Amino acid sequence: MTIALSLIAVLVAIAVIIIGAVVGAGGGGANAGPEASAEESTTPRPAPTAPPEPAVVDTFDKSAHSLDDPASIWVVVNQVRALNPEDYVPDDLVEVPVAHTWVPELRQEASDAVVAMFAAAADEADYYLASNSAFRSYDTQVELYGDGDDPTTAPPGHSEHQTGLAMDIGTEGGCTFECMDDSAEGEWLRANGYRFGFILRYPADKVEITGYPHESWHFRYVGVELATEMHDRGITTLEEFFDVPGGAAQ
Ligand SMILES: [Zn+2]
């Protein structure tokens, strides 16, 4: 009898412990609930999400500007695509009001873009850019080309500089050509040029396609629309984007 009573007492004790544990856990859970909702109520609700973007459809019009007209901002000039006429001179050249070694001239639209880009480099990054070469006439290119010993100098009638849309950009500190490869200013231009309508025209990995060695200083104005499209699609040469011939002349 005593044993039976003891056993009952033990069982009751165990039951009390178990019930206590369950109630305790339940109480804890009940307490956690209000705490969590209190947190929720003090946390700003996320803004309603925007409706899903429509499926991306490439609506870019590759025929919006001529690739052949020398006065087109999309004209593709390279070693196998000459300007026509070869002695073309743009009719809206202006002096570009930026720091320079040689007084730069570009077409009005490209000049405005250079001014905006140089100002942004100064404002956003404290980089001070300068022009080393911009428009060059057919006759100037004849002189520069000479015997054609310099692979970075285009034959007359084949130079982007003759379009009034290209500029060799360095720094006010005196970095001119190859030093732009590794300069912070060169990096900024490569990353941001498209915002102002410029592309690095002769990338290091596209020598076979452009026909020119890497020129970390040579930027070509093509307009913000095309430069942004190329940037967004990761296409770095006009030859690839428009599927036109390039490479070295033979
Ligand atoms: Zn150049």
Image: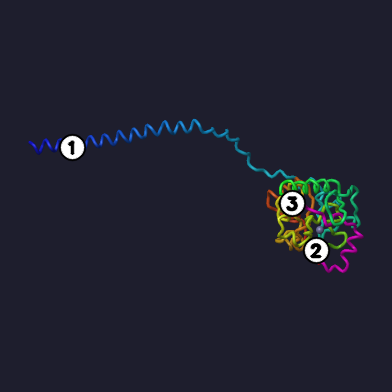
Which numbered circle lies on residue 127?
A: 3
Residue drawn at (90%, 63%), measured in percent from left and top?
Answer: 142
Q: Is residue 31 above or below residue 64?
A: above
The residue labelled by disc 1 is 11
Amino acid on which the number 3 mark rests in the picture: Tyr
Type of amino acid at the residue the image marks with label 2:
Thr
Q: Residue furthest left?
A: 1
CA separation in Å, label 3 and label 2: 26 Å
Dot 3 falls on a residue whose secondary structure is loop
- Give the spatial CA distance, label 1 vs label 3: 83 Å
The residue where tag 2 is placed is 152
Mark positioned earlier in the residue sequence (1 or 3):
1
Q: CA distance from mark 1 to mark 2?
A: 96 Å
Where is residue 14 shown, x and y percent of the image? 21, 38
Who is closer to the viewer here, 163 or 5?
5
Question: In this orientation, which residue lies closer to the viewer: 21 or 249?
Answer: 21
Task: For label 3, count other residues whose C-alpha is less than 10 Å away and answer few (under 14), some (14-19) or many (20+).
Answer: many
Spot occupied by residue 182 in the image (x, y as percentages of width and height): 71, 60
